[in-house]
Amino acid sequence: MVETLPHKLRSDARSNRDRILEAARSLYAEHGLEVTMREVARRAGVGPATLYRRFPARQVLLDAVFADELHSCRSIVEEGCADPDPWRGFTSVIERISILNVGNQGFVDAFMSEHPRSDSFAEHRATLLSELAALARRAQADGRLRRDFVIDDLVLVLLAGRGLAATPSASSVAAARRFAALATDAFRAADTNGALPPGAAVAARMARKHPPAR
Amino acid sequence: MVETLPHKLRSDARSNRDRILEAARSLYAEHGLEVTMREVARRAGVGPATLYRRFPARQVLLDAVFADELHSCRSIVEEGCADPDPWRGFTSVIERISILNVGNQGFVDAFMSEHPRSDSFAEHRATLLSELAALARRAQADGRLRRDFVIDDLVLVLLAGRGLAATPSASSVAAARRFAALATDAFRAADTNGALPPGAAVAARMARKHPPAR
């Protein structure tokens, strides 16, 4: 017993941490970032003291909760950029991020909306948008991505994923796939493309340090 | 004075009602439907008693606040359906509803999400979707709208408008216009259209009583 007790304690502690993260992840996914620490503790089945011992501030919890999504997001962008076919890479990013987004409104809010309480995402956002803009320029050079595409258009589509989170969860992945396929057709270079009105500059503050795709 | 007093009272009452509606409209637009009656009263600068005398229940206030948006929504759909060119009518609906949506997340939530507290929208929703499905069938028959379009695709785009409400308000109308133009290109019949994955059936519950566009 003397030898197993510390192990058991570490195991309980880990289990509490995992339960808190799981509770916070599902609450943020369902309700966005307005969920309180008290609600997280209640859903996790731990006392407030345990919650604050593990995560002394809300921002620490947010960073931990969204670490996985951020990692997924970065992998998706890196794999898209590594694709020898830039158009295929570009469209795979749209589909995979749309699916990621539709399941987690909290992450999209935290990552895209310059939420004052999640500033730690700002640098990641600028880096990923810069990489995506470079990928977009290569897809345009290949003649597959429409010439009047700007990186703000991709931001619009990714923000739209936030709206799709309102679809019933049973069909949300199908909705995200279909939406991404429609977005792909919208972005495809084609004789039938309509004239786009001026860009919205929604990503201006996000991408300030980096040139847009054109 | 004896003659002007009743007029003044009526005028004050009307002014209170207008101020409450204006306060509720902007609060719902900014924060969605979770805004409390207390917050509405505070923003309007009236006491709770005055608020409840005018609007005895939250649903009464919601109906009054969104009456204008619902009227706008219906006008947009009716004018689109009346256009002798069904494709032009269809695309004008996308653009005009996108602009309406982007400025008012509360209305989109109330109208699209089957919110338990705003059931009075259910019938309007079914009627408008049915009219839009008929317009879509005519645009398909004309060969302008892609054959594999289903009415759920339009619902996806309208739900996406909810996500666009996160853009800074200074650029939100421009964002909505550009997004609608991209959606129009996505829906346009073209040799370059990709194969769409299966539909998401997001509107299944909404449009149950009415056949989809195909």
Image (cartoon, coloured by chain):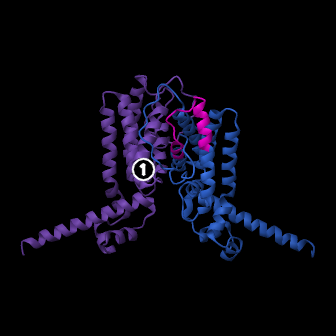
Chain colours: A blue, B purple
The boundaries of the magenta stretch are A132-155
Q: Is residue A16 visible?
A: yes
Residue count near mark 1 (Cα–Cα under 10 Å), binned few <14, some 14–19, many ≥20 = many
Q: In the picture, which quadrant includes the N terminus of chain A? A: bottom right
Pick whichever, B102 or B149, lies toward us: B102
Q: Is residue B121 left or right of residue A125?
A: left
Q: Is residue B211 left or right of residue B45?
A: right
Q: Kindly identify which residue carries mark 1.
A: B172
Q: Is residue B199 visible?
A: no
Q: Is residue B103 left or right of residue A108?
A: left
Q: Residue at x 49, y 42 (%)?
A: B156
What residue type is disc 1 on?
Answer: Ser
Percent position (x, y) of residue B6? Answer: 12, 71
Pick whichever, A108 or A175, lies toward us: A108
Q: Is residue B205 above or below residue A70?
A: above
Q: Is residue A154 magenta?
A: yes
Where residue B178 sits, quadrant-wise, is top left
Q: Residue at x 37, y 63 (%)?
A: B58
Q: Main secondary structure of the magenta part?
A: helix
Q: Residue at x 61, y 47 (%)?
A: A130
Query: How many numbered marks are there?
Result: 1
